[in-house]
Amino acid sequence: MKRVTVILAILFLAFGVAYAKDYTVTKKAGSYMVHVRMDKNPPITGKNNIAISIQDAAGADVVDAAVIVEYSMPAMPGMPAMNYKTKTETKNKKYMAIVDFSMSGAWNINVKITRAGKTQSVKFNVDVS
């Protein structure tokens, strides 16, 4: 009985890892609601696809903004800070980009939304494995 329980636990964990949900964050930026989705959870060292959808105060999709994703890792002893920036492209009412984390650890992500001459931003952190 104990062996069956152990085997079932291993299968359950393997199934859960294989079908883990995307990493998602939803935050408010001014009058916008911003939904960020990364295709890996947790994000990994290397390339991660990111999709950003933005709704205005009325709930309508915003597709005419300039969106930039900045990501950085603060300086640590013996290592300078790392700062990167990538532009997005609009596809199916979403802003798509690739973030390429150069190492594991805590990263800061800042999504900058510029529309009608005004810039709003959403900041969040991820732990890259």
Image (cartoon, helix red, strand yellow):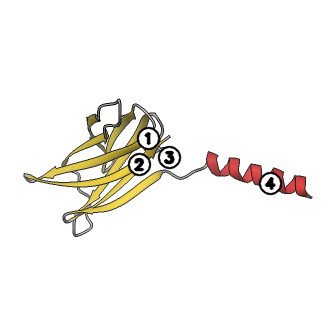
Work out how far the residue at label 2 is from the one at label 3, CA to CA, in angstroms: 8 Å
Tell me: residue 60, above or below residue 118. below
Residue placed at 65% from the left, 52% from the top?
16
Residue at 41% x, 48% y: name it: 126
- Position of residue 45 relative to residue 17, above or below, is above
Q: Residues within 10 Å of mark 3 (few under 14, many from 20)?
A: some
- Give the quarter of the image for residue 56: bottom left
Give residue 85's position: percent from left, percent from top.
25, 36
Residue type at mark 4 is Leu
Q: Which residue is disc 4 drawn over?
A: 8
State whether residue 102 is above or below residue 19.
Answer: above
Disc 3 or disc 1, which is closer to the eye?
A: 1
* Residue 61 shown left or right of residue 6 in the figure: left
x and y, in percent, of residue 119 in the image: 14, 53
Which mark is nearer the camera, 1 or 4? Answer: 1
Q: Quadrant of the N terminus?
A: bottom right
In the picture, the disc for residue 126 is 2
> Real-space Cα distance between discs 2 and 1?
8 Å
Q: Which residue is mark 3?
A: 42
Under mark 1, the amino acid is Gly
Q: Report crowding for label 1: few under 14, some 14 to 19, many 20 or more residues within 10 A (C-alpha).
A: few
Q: Nearer the viewer, residue 91 or 111?
A: 111
- The answer to whether the residues at label 2 and label 1 have Cβ atoms under 8 Å apart is no
